[in-house]
Amino acid sequence: NQPIALDEAQDFSSFKLEIDDPDLDLVRAAVLLADVARFEDRHTAWVSAPALVELAASAGAEPSEWSKGFDRMVSKARPHGWIDEATGAVKGHVVWLSET
């Protein structure tokens, strides 16, 4: 069971960070995912673009096709402020699965 995974790697229309550990709170999630995401608050995280590339490769996504889809997503997200221009991180909604 991989602690961090990119599910539905080819779906560039719905980006979110799902936390599937009922024992994890925001502080612990921020520490555990520090190399992957920076939490703005309980509902918003900025996910590292290099981490997404690495996770896509781990998920078996074909690199050049995935990159094209990712680039399209970034270009659509940028005008909405969903890309951190300084770091390239992607803004995502955080879903706490234990609360759904």
Image (spheres, rainbow, N blue to C red):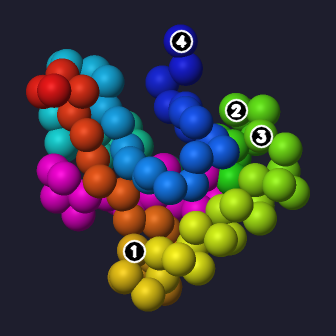
Within 10 angstroms of label 4, few (less than 14), some, or many (20 or more) residues? few
Q: Is residue 99 above or below residue 44?
A: above
Query: In terms of depth relative to the viewer, which is nearer, 42 or 97?
Result: 97
Q: Which residue is mark 1?
A: 82
Q: Is residue 38 above or below residue 32?
A: below
Write the start and end of the magenta stretch as one range: 36-52
The amino acid on which the numbered mark 2 sits, given as a three-letter code, is Ala
Q: Marks 2 and 3: in contact by CB < 8 Å?
A: yes
CA distance for labels 2 and 4: 13 Å
CA distance for labels 1 and 2: 23 Å
Q: Which residue is mark 2?
A: 59
Residue 70 horizontal side relative to residue 76, left or right: right
Q: Is residue 87 visible?
A: no
Q: Which residue is mark 3?
A: 61
Q: Earlier in the sequence, mark 4 or mark 3?
A: 4
CA distance for labels 3 and 2: 6 Å
Q: Residue furthest front?
A: 13
The amino acid on which the numbered mark 1 sits, given as a three-letter code, is Trp
Q: Earlier in the sequence, mark 1 or mark 3?
A: 3
Q: Which residue is mark 4?
A: 1
Magenta residue check for 96? no
Residue 18 on image: x %, y %: 35, 36
